C-alpha cells in the first residue's frame, strides 16, 4: 500500500501485545507516499515490520499485507 499523504514517515517496527510498538530504526526508512507499508491499529508500518502475538508472528510485505512468518 502507498499513501498519498506527504511527509508521513514510516519506520520498521516490532509490535507486541498489548499495543506495544518498538521502532527498530532511529530514523524513518522512508515516507508513506513513496514506500510500501502495512496498516495495524490505524498506524503505518514499513515493510519488514513484525507483529508478535499469541497466535503467531506476522511480517509486513511489499504488497501491503501481513503474512504469517511461522509457516
Image (cartoon, rainbow, N blue to C red):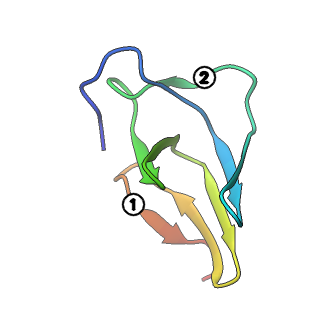
Q: Which mark is residue 16?
A: none
- Residue at 60% across, 22% down: 28
Q: Is residue 38 left or right of residue 2?
A: right
Q: Report the front residue among 22 and 24.
A: 22
Q: Is residue 47 left or right of residue 64?
A: right
Q: Is residue 32 left or right of residue 46?
A: left
- The numbered mark, 1 or 2, whose residue comes first in the sequence reads 2
The vertical placement of 44 against 10, above or below, is below
- Residue at 64% across, 57% down: 50
Quadrant (top left/top right/bottom left/bottom right) for the C terminus: bottom right
Residue 44: where, in percent of width, then height? 46, 41
Single out the residue that lies furthest toward the left. 4
**Residue linked to disc 2:** 28
Q: Report the front residue among 66 and 71.
A: 66
- Residue at 49% across, 69% down: 67
Residue 66: where, in percent of width, then height? 46, 64
SS of the residue at dot 2?
A: loop
Badges 1 and 2: C-beta atoms under 8 Å apart? no
Examine the image and state in which quarter residue 1 appears.
Answer: top left
The vertical placement of 8 against 16, above or below, is above
Residue 40: where, in percent of width, then height? 47, 55
The vertical placement of 20 against 71, above or below, is above
- Residue at 73% across, 30% down: 25
Label 1: how many Cα within 10 Å (few below 14, some 14–19, many 20+): some
SS of the residue at dot 1?
A: loop
Q: Which mark is residue 65?
A: 1
Residue 10: where, in percent of width, then height? 52, 30
Label 2: how many Cα within 10 Å (few below 14, some 14–19, many 20+): some
Amino acid at each position: 500500500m502507498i499513501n498519498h499523504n506527504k511527509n508521513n514517515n514510516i519506520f520498521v517496527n516490532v509490535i507486541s501485545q498489548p499495543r506495544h510498538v518498538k521502532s527498530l530504526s532511529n530514523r524513518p526508512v522512508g515516507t508513506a507516499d513513496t514506500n510500501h507499508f502495512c496498516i495495524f491499529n490505524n498506524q503505518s508500518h514499513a515493510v519488514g515490520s513484525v507483529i508478535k502475538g499469541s497466535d503467531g508472528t506476522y511480517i509486513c510485505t511489499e504488497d501491503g499485507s501481513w503474512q504469517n512468518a511461522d509457516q
